Image (cartoon, grey):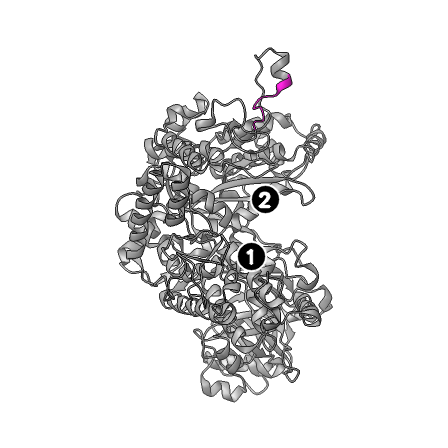
């Protein structure tokens, strides 16, 4: 029963509250290291050990046989014997100090035999035996072999490893230094990290976080290993917020937490999380002893849990709330009640009261736009209200009373995370942030495309013939899909997977990143003239708001602007689509309601783009690719997770094991500040074309260098430029040699600088955009270096500027659609290389048949986090 679930969760919480390292299920030697850490990095001087581990790491995705073949091939070439495969794995485990906690679980993934289930011999849900019945019977009860196990990678050894090398220990101080700077400044003008969140800053001011403490983000998600059969598995991880954003999301710095094998979804997730949380609670209570190599002393680390991330279904399990279908179904536990259809049981968060509607508990009047941008008092009120209401549910005397209290409070059970010491975590429910990945990429896109395509459920009392927004049908949908597919060549390779033709592929594993680029990158321009104007304008407000939330630097003014647009989108959405009709209440989903909270939550929790589920998706994909035993995928997945934790710990202590990503191909030239010129390049200086000569002359004049009448410069051209964000900008010089079908055009760039004076611009017959801090878009012809009088080197790019965006479209779309005319040879300009911000897509804009050479801008959302974890490949050319 639900009351029994409440009681079971409280039993887990009680066990967490009593957690200590003494009752942690770890071997004695591991516990000893946690309390008495080694005071130096591991000894890596043995050449056989060093080479064996390096070969093993180089063959991560290969088989054991591959390692054995390499070992055999080197046998006669070396003066020493390499370690065997089993020996090298054993050494990795020993050196890293990471030993998994292995616990029994139900063979059907119902529960883990932990906490209150620890003494059960059968599953309390499906009654399947815990131990192998055959072995139990043949041994007369002496051999208890579990039928299924799961692995937890304890945090303690992984945290200790992060400070055992001076270089890594120094990098672990980034969070403390940055937060001290923010607190000293007294004001947050720009949000550029999770450290800018008011809750985390308040915790530091109260002394809950010290300079030696680690700050963590917890993330969990489920995945299906095979599409054709039941193969669910759940994985959770920890992200170290002490590292800078350009490091913390990299593969080597993600801390695997636990692997929950399938084949089914866990029926009691708390029981599987318990070992990892029990270990964390023990560390928080007792303090983890860590050798800080940068300070050359042992420090005490009380890990602080900042945020807990999950998609909406998993979050309902973690936070103990009723979930999105409940009367109080808001993920942020706001007190706005939903409304249900006559005779229905599911609630929808509609602000407008339906017409001719009288359902008790749901017939409240229209609600004004909720979630004030400045709502600190509401956060405090929410926490107090949550604790009061939790006690109301706890006091339920029977099942009927429990159901009433659950309906009125929105609480099913306490969160297992409340068992962690309150001084070392954010309070509940404040620690549960929005999940921007699932919200924007999947939930909102599913709703909007469902409406525009007319595939969303139509109530018997409704009529699709009245849906004037239902425009993506039949031939229009087919043509639209072809346009999306054809845009592939205009989207740079750094944008990862380009959206496929949705008319053909939307039901065939369309990825979250495809949806994000398709809906928030393409659709504002591609649906212009297809969606009726008022629906299109409403959609564009959402697009701009979501784009701002995905930025990695957001000013307070920008965040306030995003909040204004998102509130307008939510209000207009109900007026345009739902229209106060009870039959359309199901249009009002929690994904729309959450947009009312998104900007204020960004102020409270910090930059939402840095608290998404993208790192989890990456880890799931990586571990899934490393499965090498299809006959037993879950056990192999668990072993890969354990190995990843051990290898990452080892790389932190021995940095030479990590591949140096700062190295660039042969012949590259480092320009400083993260800019690197990459080949191809000319073998000799060549004259520039006549159409480019005036641009170079004008540049030289602008820096005080006068040219002669016979000025005929020759330059050595470079083809590519690596940017600080990890993207590689290319050039028309080399890209134009390839057919469009073989290209992902990457020569169009975003430039931010004051290029010229207005007089100069008029003289050169080119334009300057006076919007968004003077943003320009340009096509790079080539890169070059110029030596002027005095030997000063200038790093330059010859570009063709696109014209200013169509002002009418820009205004109507709330600046979502930047539709520009290609400048060509008439708009040539020379710019400083370091004024280039990013690579963008310039996609042909053909909404109006009279438009010629028109292109709309597509910028990659969430660029920094994606490229701190997935750097763009830069091969030799």
Residue 223's disc number: 2
**Tally of numbered tags:** 2
Q: Position of residue 195 (x, y in %)?
A: 36, 52
- What span is in magenta? 127-134
Q: Position of residue 619 (x, y in %)?
A: 56, 44
> 375 or 167, which is in the foreground?
375
> Which residue is drawn at the image coordinates 26% and 58% (left, top)?
186
> 615 or 49, which is in the foreground?
615
- Determine whether 180 is above or below 41 in the image: below
Name which of mark 1 and mark 2 comes first in the sequence: 2
Asked whether the viewer can see residue 298, the reply is no
> Which residue is drawn at the image coordinates 54% and 42% (left, top)?
658
Q: Which residue extends farthest top?
A: 140
Quarter occupied by residue 471? bottom right
Badge 1 element: helix
Q: Position of residue 483 (x, y in %)?
A: 67, 70
């Amino acid at each position: 029963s639900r009351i029994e679930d409440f009681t079971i969760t409280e039993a887990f919480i009680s066990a967490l509250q009593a957690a200590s390292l003494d009752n942690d299920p770890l071997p004695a030697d591991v516990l000893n290291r946690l309390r008495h850490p080694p005071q130096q990095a591991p000894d890596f001087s043995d050449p056989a050990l060093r080479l064996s581990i390096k070969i093993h790491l180089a063959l991560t995705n290969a088989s054991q046989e591959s390692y054995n073949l390499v070992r055999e091939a080197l046998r006669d070439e070396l003066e020493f014997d390499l370690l065997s495969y089993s020996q090298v794995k054993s050494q990795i485990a020993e050196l890293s100090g990471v030993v998994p906690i292995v616990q029994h679980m139900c063979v059907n993934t119902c529960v883990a035999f932990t906490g209150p289930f620890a003494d059960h011999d059968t599953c309390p849900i499906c009654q399947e035996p815990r131990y192998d019945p055959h072995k139990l019977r043949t041994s007369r009860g002496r051999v208890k072999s579990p039928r299924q196990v799961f692995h937890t990678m304890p945090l303690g050894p992984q945290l200790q490893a992060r400070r055992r090398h001076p270089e890594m220990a120094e990098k672990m101080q980034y969070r403390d230094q940055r937060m001290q700077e923010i607190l000293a400044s007294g004001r947050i003008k720009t949000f550029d990290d999770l450290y800018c969140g008011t809750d985390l800053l308040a915790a530091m001011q109260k002394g809950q976080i010290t300079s030696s403490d680690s700050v963590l983000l917890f993330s969990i998600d489920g995945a299906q290993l095979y599409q054709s059969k039941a193969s669910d598995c759940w994985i959770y991880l920890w992200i170290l917020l002490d590292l800078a954003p350009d490091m913390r999301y990299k593969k080597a710095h993600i801390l695997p937490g636990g692997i929950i094998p399938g084949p089914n979804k866990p029926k009691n997730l708390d029981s599987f999380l318990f070992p990892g949380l029990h270990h964390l609670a023990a560390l928080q209570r007792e303090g983890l002893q860590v050798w800080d190599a940068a300070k050359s002393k042992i420090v005490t680390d009380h890990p602080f849990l900042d945020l807990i991330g999950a998609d909406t279904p998993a979050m309902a399990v973690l936070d103990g709330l009723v979930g999105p279908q409940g009367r109080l179904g808001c993920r942020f536990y706001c007190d706005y009640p939903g409304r249900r259809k006559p005779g229905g049981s599911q609630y929808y968060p509609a602000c407008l009261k339906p017409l001719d509607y009288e359902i008790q508990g749901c017939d409240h009047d229209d609600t004004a736009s909720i979630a004030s941008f400045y709502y600190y008092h509401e956060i405090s009120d929410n926490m107090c209200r949550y604790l009061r209401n939790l006690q109301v549910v706890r006091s339920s005397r029977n099942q009927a009373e429990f159901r009433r209290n659950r309906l009125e409070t929105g609480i099913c059970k306490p969160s297992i995370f409340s068992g962690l010491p309150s001084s070392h975590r954010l309070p509940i429910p404040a620690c549960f942030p929005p999940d921007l990945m699932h919200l924007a990429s999947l939930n909102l896109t599913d709703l909007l495309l469902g409406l525009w395509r007319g595939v969303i459920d139509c109530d018997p009392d409704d009529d699709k013939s009245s849906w004037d927004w239902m425009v993506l049908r039949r031939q229009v949908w087919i043509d639209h899909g072809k346009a999306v597919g054809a845009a592939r060549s205009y989207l740079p390779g750094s944008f990862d997977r380009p959206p496929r033709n949705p008319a053909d592929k939307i039901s065939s594993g369309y990825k979250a990143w495809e949806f994000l680029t398709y809906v928030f990158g393409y659709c504002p321009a591609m649906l212009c003239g297809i969606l009726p104007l008022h629906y299109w304008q409403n959609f564009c407000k959402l697009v701009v708001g979501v784009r701002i939330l995905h930025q990695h630097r957001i000013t307070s003014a920008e965040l306030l602007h995003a909040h204004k647009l998102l509130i307008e989108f939510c209000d207009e959405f109900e007026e345009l689509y739902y229209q106060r009709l009870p039959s359309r209440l199901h249009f009002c989903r929690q994904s729309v309601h959450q947009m009312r909270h998104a900007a204020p939550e960004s102020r409270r929790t910090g930059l939402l783009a840095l608290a998404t589920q993208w790192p989890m998706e990456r880890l799931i994909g990586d571990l899934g690719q490393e499965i090498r035993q299809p006959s037993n995928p879950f056990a192999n997945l668990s072993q890969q997770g354990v190995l990843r934790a051990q290898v990452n710990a080892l790389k932190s202590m021995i940095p030479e094991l990590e591949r140096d990503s700062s190295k660039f191909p042969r012949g590259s030239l480092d320009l400083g500040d993260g800019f690197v010129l990459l080949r191809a390049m000319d073998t000799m200086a060549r004259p520039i074309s006549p159409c480019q000569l005036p641009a170079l002359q004008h540049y030289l004049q602008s820096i005080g260098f006068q040219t002669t009448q016979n000025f005929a410069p020759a330059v050595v051209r470079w083809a590519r430029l690596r940017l600080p964000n990890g993207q590689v900008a290319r050039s028309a010089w080399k890209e134009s040699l390839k057919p469009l079908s073989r290209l992902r055009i990457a020569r169009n760039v975003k430039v931010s600088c004051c290029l010229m004076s207005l007089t100069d611009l008029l003289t050169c017959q080119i334009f300057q955009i006076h919007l968004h801090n003077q943003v320009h878009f340009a096509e790079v012809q080539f890169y070059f270096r110029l030596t002027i009088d005095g030997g000063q080197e200038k790093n330059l790019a010859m570009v063709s500027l696109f014209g200013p965006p169509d002002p009418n479209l820009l205004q109507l779309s709330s600046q979502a659609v930047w539709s520009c005319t290609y400048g060509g040879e008439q708009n040539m300009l020379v710019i400083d290389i370091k004024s280039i911000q990013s690579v963008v897509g310039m996609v042909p804009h053909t909404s109006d048949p009279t438009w010629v050479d028109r292109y709309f801008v597509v910028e990659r959302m969430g660029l920094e986090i994606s490229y701190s974890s997935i750097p763009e490949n830069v091969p030799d050319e």
